[in-house]
Amino acid sequence: MMLSANTSYFEGVSDHIISQMQNISRINEGAKNGVKHYKVVARIDGRTSECCRSMNGRIIPASHIEAQSGAIQNAKNIAQKKAAATWRNGAFYGKILPKDFGLPPYHFRCRTEIVPVWIDEEEVGGVVMRNTSPLNKDEVIKHIDKIGVERVLSKDNYYLWQK
């Protein structure tokens, strides 16, 4: 039997499998260490998809990610595996994630990953804000909005806004 797809396709499939397994490995390790939330981190550049841009910074409960990861790991065939982790073409702005979506990769050649985060609360100007403290050296303020996306005001943006 001769395969008709080119080498690039098979490289993409292997990249997808490796990325998915790296994220699943991170989830399995996080479950052992009591991780309660994960943050989606997309590589933002000219090649970033609309889906990955919309998911970048999203905070997802570990229970959701662990359930999806478990469904992928327990799949008995390729159809079950695809059903546990569907690909998206467009952006996702909904508050509640479908059970088959949240764990990257989100599409072919996806470079997005998921990392564990710890959520804290702090009072800023009399307002209690949820965030993934502490602030990084270039951040002025950050908070998790009502749909679960962490918003960050960096020093570069802050000083431009002040001018």
Image (cartoon, rainbow, N blue to C red):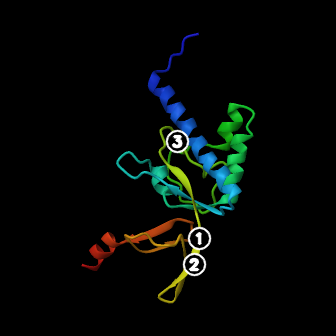
For badge 1, the amino acid type reads Ile
Number of numbered labels in the structure image: 3
Q: In the image, is residue 40 above or below residue 74?
A: below
Q: Residues within 10 Å of mark 1 (few under 14, many from 20)?
A: some
For badge 2, the amino acid type reads Glu
Q: Which mark is residue 121?
A: 2
Q: Nearer the viewer, residue 19 or 49?
A: 19
Q: Earlier in the sequence, mark 3 or mark 1?
A: 3
* Residue located 55% across and 44% down the image: 105
Quick one: which residue is furthest to the top in this view? 1
The residue that label 3 is drawn on is: 107
Residue 48, image x and y in percent? 41, 48
- Name the element at disc 3: loop
- Name the element at disc 2: strand
| Quadrant (top left/top right/bottom left/bottom right) for the C terminus | bottom left
Are the two marked residues, 1 and 2, in contact with CB atoms closer than 8 angstroms? yes
Q: Which mark is residue 119?
A: 1
- Name the element at disc 1: loop
Q: Nearer the viewer, residue 79 or 117?
A: 117
* Residue located 55% across and 56% down the image: 115
Are the two marked residues, 3 and 2, in contact with CB atoms closer than 8 angstroms? no
* Residue located 40% across and 53% down the image: 44
Are the two marked residues, 3 and 1, in contact with CB atoms closer than 8 angstroms? no
| Quadrant (top left/top right/bottom left/bottom right) for the N terminus | top right
